[in-house]
Image (tube, helix red, strand yellow):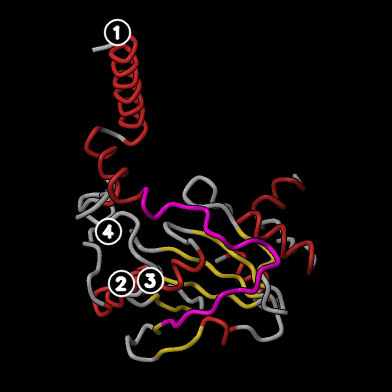
Amino acid sequence: MKIYDDYKDHADFLTIYIREAHPIDEWRMKSNEKDRDDVCYVQPKTLAQRVAIANDFTKRFKFGLPFGIDDMSNAANDAYAAWPERLYIIDENGHISYKGGNGPFKYDPKEVRAWLAQKFGEVKHAQTTTAATQESR
Amino acid sequence: MNPIFKWTLISLAVLLIAAYVALSFMAGGPKDAFQMLRFALPYMHRGNLKVGDNAPDATLVALDGDTRFQLRQHLAGRPLVLVFGSFT
């Protein structure tokens, strides 16, 4: 989200919601279980189910990025080999300019930031007031 | 049975078991390892896209569940960052 805030005046962003990575009826993750994060869903079998989970996600995190959901043909997922998570950048001419690694271990938003910084300049953030006050003492 | 063939089979079996034990350790248990092999491996691949390729189009659905649009409709003369993922 921070990258979006920093570069939304220069680039467009689109989140594409794909098949679940760790539904409870497939490769479930203990960290998703009810008493921790309450992220327990079965793998959607219908578009309505996938849309419902996507809506839960956007509401829970107040997710404001442009959003699209892969339909049950999983065409976007297949075309981009996206599962479980991946980042791409498409340039102004519609060509792949950056292809990120497969998540979770090779999924690296810093690479996207570096690409955008190289093209549009680095976005620096001002120091917090507390840090600035401590430095001046 | 040919002894070389027998020992090759035994060595292979031991290697497979060791690999499964290592995977279980990484995945958090033998059940997790099995689920990973069954549900994750078929979907985890590099894909054929390379830098420079034309970005494929796909039909996407909006959060209202009804409105459909094309991925490439979001190309508007600026770079487009695609973030693929899911809630779980």
Query: Residue A69 location in percent, x, y?
Result: 40, 77
Other-residue count near label 3 (Cα within 10 Å), few / some / many at <14 / 14–19 / ≥20: some
Q: What is the spatial separation of the Cα atoms under label 3 and label 1, in whole angstroms?
A: 49 Å
For the C terminus of chain B, give its image quadrant. bottom left
Give the residue displayed 43% in from the left and 81% down from the top. B60
Q: Which residue is labeled 2 in the image?
A: A56
Q: Amino acid at mark 1?
A: Pro
Q: Up-down: is A28 above or below B26? A: below
Other-residue count near label 2 (Cα within 10 Å), few / some / many at <14 / 14–19 / ≥20: some
Q: Which residue is labeled 1 in the image?
A: B3
Q: Which residue is labeled 4 in the image?
A: A39
- Asked which quadrant contains residue A55, the reply is bottom left
* Circles 2 and 4: CB atoms closer than 8 Å: no
Drawn side of residue A92 relative to residue B65, left or right: right
Query: Residue A40 location in percent, x, y?
Result: 23, 58
Other-residue count near label 1 (Cα within 10 Å), few / some / many at <14 / 14–19 / ≥20: few
Q: Which residue is labeled 3 in the image?
A: A74
**Element type at marker 1?**
helix
Q: Earlier in the sequence, mark 2 or mark 4?
A: 4
**Element type at marker 3?**
loop
Most common secondary structure along the magenta stretch:
loop
**Element type at marker 2?**
helix
Q: Earlier in the sequence, mark 3 or mark 4?
A: 4
Mark 4, mark 1: which one is toward the viewer? 1
Drawn side of residue A73 relative to residue A24, left or right: right
